[in-house]
Amino acid sequence: MANKEKLFTEFTAPTTQEWLDKIEVDLKGADFQKRLVWRTNEGFNVQPFYRREDLANLKTPDALPGEFPFVRGNKKDSNVWYVRQNIEVTDAKETNKKALDILNKGIDSLGFKLKGDMVSKETVKALLDGIYCDCIEINFATCPRHAVELAEILVAYFAEKGYDKAKVVGSIEFDPMAKMVMKGKDVTPVLENGPKLVEALKEYPNFRCIAVSTDALNNAGAYIVQELGYALAWGNEYLQQLTDAGVDVDLAAKSIKFNMGVSENYFMEIAKFRAARLLWAQIVKQYEPKNDDSCQMCVNATTSTYNQTLFDSYVNLLRSQTEAMSAALGSVHSMVVTPFDAPYEEATDFSERIARNQQLIIKEESHFDRIVDPGAGSYYIEHLTDALAQEAWKIFLKVEEEGGFLAAVKAGTIQDDINATNVKRHGDAAKRKEFLLGTNQFPNFTEKSEGKKAKVCACGCGNADEATFKAINSTRLAADFEDLRIHTEETKVPTAFMLTIGNLAMRQARAQFSCNFLACAGYKVIDNLGFKTVEEGVDAALEAKADIVVICSSDDEYAEYAIPAFKYLNGRAMFVVAGAPACMEDLKAAGIENYIHVKCNVLETLKEYNQKLGI
């Protein structure tokens, strides 16, 4: 075309104030701050929209991929990551067979978890038989006391095989401080092995040996900004210890690997990994490394177990899929997708296959590995990156003021912070301020546990160290509801009958709400189309052998229907009003004491009902 016409030139671009004025009109007097501004748990507010001017003072949009401060990733030409699967080692030969099998099914990163007393030349040789360690990533997790021994065995094995040292990619996850912060065990003498471990592997530039395991904090309920802030302090503690021991700063920094979790907060998790690289690069820079590449943050991301559920467990696939997408778009080094059945059983071949394929789908079919930092330039993601960085930096500085991460762990301040968050989140889940689909919201009415029980953690290397410091309570968010539902199922399953009457829209809405509410404890719920009289409804409930009768109507009509229904029922079943009507005080005066509504603590209410029903 000879003439190139710019579209929309006849329109004037609206200003931010004009947008706000239009929003105020549409809100019809409602408070903008209360209705549209998201007050996050991370310490900052999120606006309903962002414009280019919101990025005017930010430096992150000017960054380039593969360049300091690496906010946009460590790579310039792709976003490829390692697809990792961890294997618990009980028998070296059998584990090797499994490793070879999954390498043919899309895995290119292996994580071997072996107990300290299994570390030997024979075990390593059997584990790695037929595996080309210069073609895939290879990772080991073992007792910190045996990490140096394992490193020396691996170095000898790699030399025997004649591998190019630069092509051996992997890690030994040496992280004594993880046991201190999570279990309260004093293993400070083991920290002295860090410099020895780095020295043993110094000729392997892509084999890291010092781990920062904040995925444990994620799985204990930590908010995103808490995990990020403590990850920085945790990593800095190791970096300081290594350099104080005389390790070259470039070598020390390149020896550290971060194992981070991924929660369900999609865009904020993308921003978390971007902010993490930005801040870690700034920290390492203060140690004056010779090479900017030493400032790169290497992250293995693992999808969370904190929000996984025992009931309706296939929903875990939806959770882990969005988490995997966040990690991939956040440009991580490697990723582990937790199998959907992790809360209640050892992963099966089926669940492991699905977990692998969750990564392969976004990599091979959706091409998430092709584009470097696709979130860059998004006004929203750039804002989240900056906001998370600022809040996480406050946590980092606070820990440093306390004397560093190790000192804060010994004082118990980090454990107290994470535990407080865990308690708050459990409280929010109990009140349904935080949703767990299929557990505290929209449960499967007919699902049974079928013998499923929550797995008990049996981690550790067998050392019986006494707890010296405070520990972190890693309780899944759904655990309280699951315990209640299983107890109901194993004791007595009551029947809850919906006595629907009056206004059609209100009775249907409240019946649906009540069914979802009561089914969270595993109650059998019976919904109905509606009754002409309360007597008809009560008779039908008694015929159905209901233990609970829930009257569902409109607020105005409760004054007419509730007391007659309660009197006609005459104590033959528990009577519940769905809602919090204006006439509640009158109803209470008549003896009606049970109400369910959106402001209820669902968990405590259901526990109370179980007690009243003798369950």
Image (cartoon, helix red, strand yellow):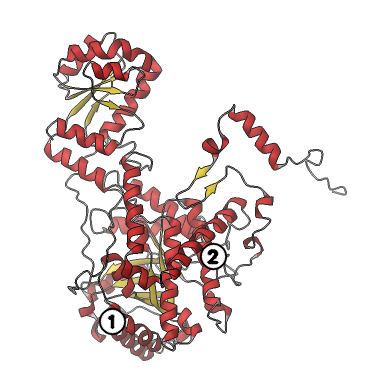
In the image, what residue type sits under mark 1?
Pro
Please identify the quarter of the rendering in which residue 399 is found: bottom left
Give me the residue at 37% from left, 50% from top. 317
* Residue situated in front as seen by the camera: 257 or 75: 257
Q: Are marks 1 and 2 in contact (CB under 8 Å)?
A: no
Q: Secondary structure at mark 2?
A: loop
- On residue 107, which mark appears? none
Q: Is residue 169 something one can see in this rendering?
A: no
- Residue 322: percent from left, percent from top: 44, 51
Q: Which residue is mark 2?
A: 79
- Residue 541: percent from left, percent from top: 19, 18
Give me the residue at 62% from left, 52% from top. 379
483 is higher (above) or lower (below) than 271: above
Q: Tell me the quadrant of the picture where the C terminus can be found.
A: top left
* Residue situated in front as seen by the camera: 504 or 165: 504
Q: Which residue is mark 1?
A: 189
Crowding near pointer 2: few (<14 within 10 Å), some, many (20+)? many
Q: Secondary structure at mark 1?
A: helix
**Among numbered discs 1 and 2, the one appearing first in the sequence:** 2
Give me the residue at 39% from left, 50% from top. 319
* Residue situated in front as seen by the camera: 134 or 563: 563
222 is higher (above) or lower (below) than 156: above
Give me the residue at 27% from left, 82% from top. 146
- Left or right: 545 with respect to 174? left
In this view, the mark in front (1 or 2): 1
Mark 1 vs mark 2, CA separation in Å: 39 Å
Crowding near pointer 1: few (<14 within 10 Å), some, many (20+)? few
In the image, what residue type sits under mark 2?
Asn
- Residue 177: percent from left, percent from top: 33, 72
